[in-house]
Structures are given as C-alpha cells and as structure tokens.
C-alpha cells in the first residue's frame, strides 16, 4: 500500500514517524518528491491545489483536522475520491476545557475582578442568576454537542443550533435558519463551533450579533471567517456586547496591526482551543484505512455538497 503525506504545518517528521510505526508494511512518500499516481491514501493538511488535482486515483484523502476547509478547494479533487476528516481524536476534551473556561470566566466575572485588583478595589459583586444565564452553541456536531452537554452539567440553560434537528439531553436544540434568532436572543455567551462553509462564512455579522442580549460575550472556536471582525468590534465599543474570547482568525497568525491584539475587551489565543494530537489522529486514520481496505464503511466522510 502507498501512502502520501503532505502537511503545510510543523511536525512533519513526527507525523511520518508515527504513521511508519503504525503501518510498518506501507510505503510512505511525501510531496513534492513521491510519485502521486500510485497513491492509495493521501493524508493532507492545507495541500496545494496542484497536488489535489493529481490524486484522482486515490482510494481516499484524509484531512489532518476536523475542519475540512484545511483541504482548501474541495472541487480540485475528483468527486469519486472520498474526503475523510478527523472526528474528536482528542480534540473534544480540549474544546470542552476551553469553552468551560470562557463561560465561567464571564459568568463569574473574573475579568471584572482582575480590573478591580489592578486598581486595588475590594468589592464583592452580586451573584448572577444562573437560570437566566443562557449559553448559545452554534454547531452541534462532534465538538459542539460535547461542549453543550458539559456546560449543561454546570446548570446553565444551553441552547444549541445545527442544520438538522437534534435531541441532546439537557440542551434545548434548534435547527435551521428560521430558528437561529431564538438561540441568539437567549445567549449571554455565544460559542461558535460551526464549520466554515458557503453558508456560515460571514454569518456572525452586525445584524446577527446585534440580536444577542445586551452584555453578551462571543467565543469563536471554529473559524475566523464566520465572524465579521469590524462588526464585533463596533458592537463591543458601542456597549452592546461585553467582549469576546477568540481562538481563530481570518488571517493566521493574527496580523500585528489587527485591533483584536490590544482591545481591552478581547482575549486572543493562537488557534489552540483543540490541538491536533499526533498519536490519537494517526490511530484514527489507520483504523479507518484498515476498514476501507476490507470494504467496510467509515465515519467522517465529508459531504461535498454541504461543505463539511
Ligand atoms: P461537525 O461536522 O461534527 O459539526 C458541525 C456542526 O455544525 C453540525 O452540528 C452541523 O449541523 C452544524 N452546521 C453546519 N452548517 C450549518 C449551518 N449552515 N447552519 C446550522 N448548523 C450548521 O464538526 P466538529 O464539531 O468536529 O468541528 C466543528 C468545527 O470546529 C470544525 O469545522 C473546525 O472549523 C472547528 N475546529 C476548530 C479547532 C480549533 O482548534 N480552534 C479544532 C477543531 C475544529 P448538522 O449536525 O445538522 O450537520
Ligand atoms: C481543526 C483545527 O480543524 O485544528 O482540526 O482547527
């Protein structure tokens, strides 16, 4: 069996070693260099379009991430080649940690106490009623549904939104464009865990963000292009929104001149809410290759028509 590995990121050598250990019987090539025509499976992160165009005979392409926008132009790959993304692979636990931190930070007003400490103020604030502190979660897939369940266990009312209807214990679920506003209207904290698709890019614009309650807080853990940066900033500066915690950006690394860097009400982290873990990801991909080799179906196959 022939594997092709391409990653635009760091750690290429560590990934190759892990795949070689897990699939000792396999030839693993890297691109550029290896011949692409004989490739059975390609494992890719942010591949150039030119490479995708040459993989028309592959049995499947694996995306080294949950977000399949990492592949770039899906149309560059022949439609007969399935694209398979990572599902969880150790990311769910990390996403829960980050999301719970963001919600508790806002709910328990730790930023306010940090400011009080800077100015030497000892003042105990009145406890915020939890039943009125709704959390909105956009995207109820592998990550969003787990985050929703984790937050509901704290006793927050959790409102989740997805494309198709869902039933998740402890979570009020809504689906489709017609029910979007009802989630926004309840969300003291809005957490975005949607994929970047033609439908979601630019979704969180001024019109939608203005539907959040006064004082709401925005947490984007998905992709930067779902949020309109200027609209978020103006709603914060006008006092409608309390602030934001952002892990993903339209351009990464976040350019040095971007207003997010120094805004007192915006917290920036460098795309770390859920790192892609080598051992977990390699184990998942290898298990799927073994199933495909004996003709069994696998999960995580991207539906190209919907873009995720
Ligand atoms: P899934 O595909 O499992 O879930 C996506 C969810 O979004 C589904 O519930 C889906 O609805 C919903 N959705 C998609 N399009 C729409 C739409 N137009 N309207 C309403 N709901 C929609 O993805 P994951 O949970 O695994 O990952 C989510 C995203 O998180 C990734 O695409 C990636 O961009 C991001 N991510 C970020 C990381 C980071 O470190 N910051 C790490 C990992 C992922 P339905 O269930 O009906 O299909
Ligand atoms: C992913 C990511 O999509 O790390 O997996 O952002």
Image: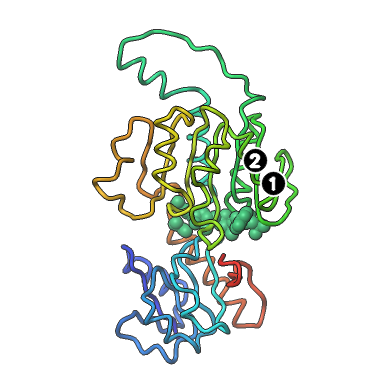
Q: Which mark is residue 120?
A: none
Residue at the spot 52% in from the left edge and 31% down from the top edge = 216
Q: Residues within 10 Å of mark 2 (few under 14, many from 20)?
A: many
Q: Quadrant of residue 263?
A: top left
- Residue 117: percent from left, percent from top: 34, 15
Q: Residue furthest left?
A: 256
Residue to which mark 2 is pinned: 183
CB within 8 Å, label 1 to label 2: yes
The answer to whether residue 243 is seen in the rendering is yes
Q: Secondary structure at mark 2?
A: helix
- Residue 118: percent from left, percent from top: 30, 17
Assign the C terminus to one quadrant of the image: bottom right
* Residue 15 vertical placement versus 61 (above, below): above
Total label count? 2
Colour pattern: rainbow
Residue at the spot 39% in from the left edge and 8% down from the top edge = 122
The residue closer to the viewer here, 236 or 253, is: 236
Residue at the spot 66% in from the left edge and 29% down from the top edge = 155
Residue to which mark 1 is pinned: 179
Spatial CA span between label 1 and label 2: 7 Å
Q: Residues within 10 Å of mark 1 (few under 14, many from 20)?
A: some
The residue closer to the viewer here, 25 or 171, is: 171
Q: Quadrant of ligand 1?
A: bottom right
Q: Secondary structure at mark 1?
A: helix
């Amino acid at each position: 069996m022939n594997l092709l590995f391409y990653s635009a990121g760091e750690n290429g050598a560590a990934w190759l070693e892990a795949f070689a250990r897990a699939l000792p019987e396999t030839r693993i090539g890297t691109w550029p260099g290896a011949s692409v025509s004989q490739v059975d499976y390609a494992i890719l992160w942010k591949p150039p379009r030119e490479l995708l165009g040459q993989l028309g005979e592959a049995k499947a392409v694996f995306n080294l991430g949950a977000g399949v926008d990492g592949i770039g132009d899906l149309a560059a790959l022949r439609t007969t080649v399935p694209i398979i993304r990572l599902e969880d692979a150790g990311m769910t636990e990390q996403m829960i940690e980050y999301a719970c931190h963001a919600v508790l930070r806002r709910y328990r007003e730790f930023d306010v106490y940090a400011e009080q400490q800077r100015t030497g103020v000892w003042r105990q604030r009145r406890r915020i009623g939890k039943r009125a502190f709704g959390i909105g979660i956009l995207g109820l897939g592998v990550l969003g549904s787990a985050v929703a369940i984790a937050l509901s266990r704290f006793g927050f009312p959790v409102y989740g939104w997805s494309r198709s209807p869902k039933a998740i214990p402890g979570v009020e679920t809504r689906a489709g464009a017609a029910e979007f506003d009802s989630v926004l209207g309840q969300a003291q904290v809005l957490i975005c865990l949607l994929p970047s698709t033609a439908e979601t890019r630019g979704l969180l614009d001024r019109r939608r963000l203005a539907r959040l309650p006064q004082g709401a807080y925005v947490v984007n853990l998905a992709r930067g292009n779902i949020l309109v940066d200027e609209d978020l900033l103006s709603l914060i500066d006008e006092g409608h929104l309390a602030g934001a915690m952002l892990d993903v950006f339209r351009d990464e690394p976040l350019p040095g001149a971007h207003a997010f860097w120094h805004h007192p009400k915006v917290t920036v982290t460098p795309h770390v809410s859920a790192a892609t873990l080598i051992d977990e990801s390699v184990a998942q991909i290898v298990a799927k290759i073994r199933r495909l080799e004996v003709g069994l179906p696998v999960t995580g196959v991207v539906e190209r028509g919907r873009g995720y």
